Image: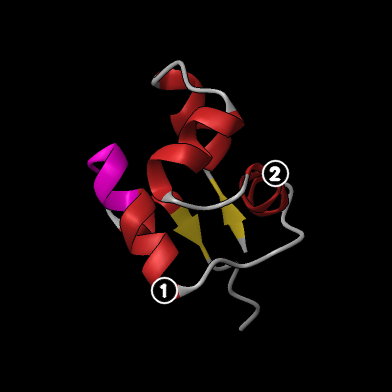
Amino acid sequence: MKNLLKVERARHNLTQADLAEKLGVSRQTIYAIENNKFNPSVTIAIKMARFFGVTVEYLFDIEDDF
């Protein structure tokens, strides 16, 4: 799964620590999601999308291998 989390975070001029604090997660969680080392829970994905005012589908994209 690829994501635009780093792009949105930069657009809002937030550090990983800033975003982590606002979402109630660790900075390491933000780092891991941005680097595709961890897929967020549905709850975290929705919180992120709502925070940035975008859809979950925009923020996270499953690469189809059909």
Disc 2: which residue: 31
What residue lies at 22% left-to-right and 41% top-to-bottom?
A: 53
Report the span colored magenta.
49-54
Nearer to me, 17 or 45: 17
Neighbour tally class for label 2: few under 14, some 14-19, many 20 plus, Cα within 10 Å: some
**Rendering coords of residue 49 (x, y %):** 32, 51
Image vertical order of residue 38 relative to residue 8, above or below: below
Q: Determine which of the numbered discs, if any, sits on residue 5 in the image.
A: none
**Rendering coords of residue 55 (x, y %):** 27, 54
Nearer to me, 27 or 49: 27
What residue lies at 38% left-to-right and 70% top-to-bottom?
A: 43
**Rendering coords of residue 13 (x, y %):** 45, 15
Magenta span: chief secondary structure = helix
Neighbour tally class for label 1: few under 14, some 14-19, many 20 plus, Cα within 10 Å: few
What residue lies at 30% left-to-right and 38% top-to-bottom?
A: 52
Nearer to me, 62 or 30: 30
**Rendering coords of residue 47 (x, y %):** 33, 56
Q: What secondary structure is found at the residue carrying circle 2?
A: helix
Q: Determine which of the numbered discs, if any, sits on residue 42 in the image.
A: 1
